[in-house]
Amino acid sequence: HHGKEVVLATLLRTSQQVCFYIYTTYVITYATTVLGFGRGLVLNMVMVMAVVSCLANPLFGHLSDLYGRRRIIGTGCALMIVFPFIYFQLLDTRSLPLVFLAIVLSNPVQDIQYGPQAAFIAEAFPASVRYSGSSLGYQLASITAGGPAPIVATLLLKQYGTSTSIAWYIAVCSVISLACCFLLPEHRGQRDRE
């Protein structure tokens, strides 16, 4: 009875999932094979990014409690339409400080979407199906968007020979998620629905 909400939750998570897997896994391959950095160095940068992300997630979740889930997630989606182009431009400089900046900022910027998503998606379902409905949306996004993202990025780079194609891929996914952000109802501050 809640197929629309499951589909919207899945598509809402598309941008976040694509960003997460490109910024945490694909970047290792890109930075080592295309940019020529050492694997250990790149892994250390990704670890620093993960620590910063651990702080960013609850911050953006808290901000969504104050200002609304849709507003925070929508801001994150809008930023992810532009940020990937900046991200790959910074990476492609091959300048260690700029590459470090790009990697460290990448996941925390996508956390603007991710921090509030658990509450936003769960609140879209009545209490009686909240766990199963939100879980379906979460897991389907992992299958449709997250898992394929590094493979799609690899194929795009091979096909077009430029990281700009990957940035466009992320931007298009972010437009999809932004649209779903406004189609999914927001119930923040309302009592549990039966």
Image: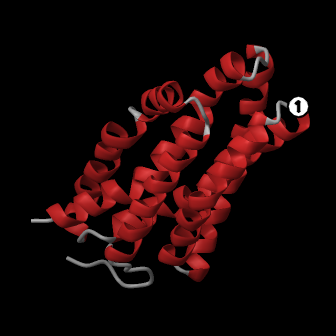
Which one is nearer the viewer's eye here, 156 or 17?
A: 156
- Figure colour scheme: secondary structure
Q: Amino acid at mark 1?
A: Leu
Residue 102 horizontal/vertical position (percent): 76, 43
Q: Is residue 152 left or right of residue 43?
A: left
Residue 138 horizontal/vertical position (percent): 35, 49
Residue 151 horizontal/vertical position (percent): 43, 27
Q: Is residue 167 above or below residue 94?
A: below
Tally of numbered tags:
1
Look at 83% across and 30% down and name the residue there: 94
Which one is nearer the viewer's eye here, 9 or 129?
A: 9
- Which corner quadrant of the image does residue 92 belong to? top right
Q: Is residue 152 left or right of residue 143?
A: right
Which one is nearer the viewer's eye here, 13 or 178?
A: 178
Question: Which residue reaches farthest front?
Answer: 160
Q: Is residue 44 above or below residue 57?
A: above
Question: Which residue reaches farthest bottom?
Answer: 190
Which one is nearer the viewer's eye here, 34 or 53?
A: 34
Q: Is residue 121 above or below residue 50?
A: below
Q: Is residue 53 left or right of residue 48?
A: left
Look at 31% across and 37% down and name the residue there: 143
Could you tell me which secondary element the residue under label 1 belongs to? Answer: helix
Visible in this render: residue 34? yes
Residue marked by disc 1: 96
Residue 193 horizontal/vertical position (percent): 25, 79
- Which corner quadrant of the image does residue 28 belong to? top right
Visible in this render: residue 54? no
Look at 54% across and 29% down and name the residue there: 157
Q: Is residue 147 above or below residue 66?
A: above
Name the quarter where the N terminus is drawn: bottom left
Crowding near pointer 1: few (<14 within 10 Å), some, many (20+)? few
Name the quarter where the C terminus is drawn: bottom left
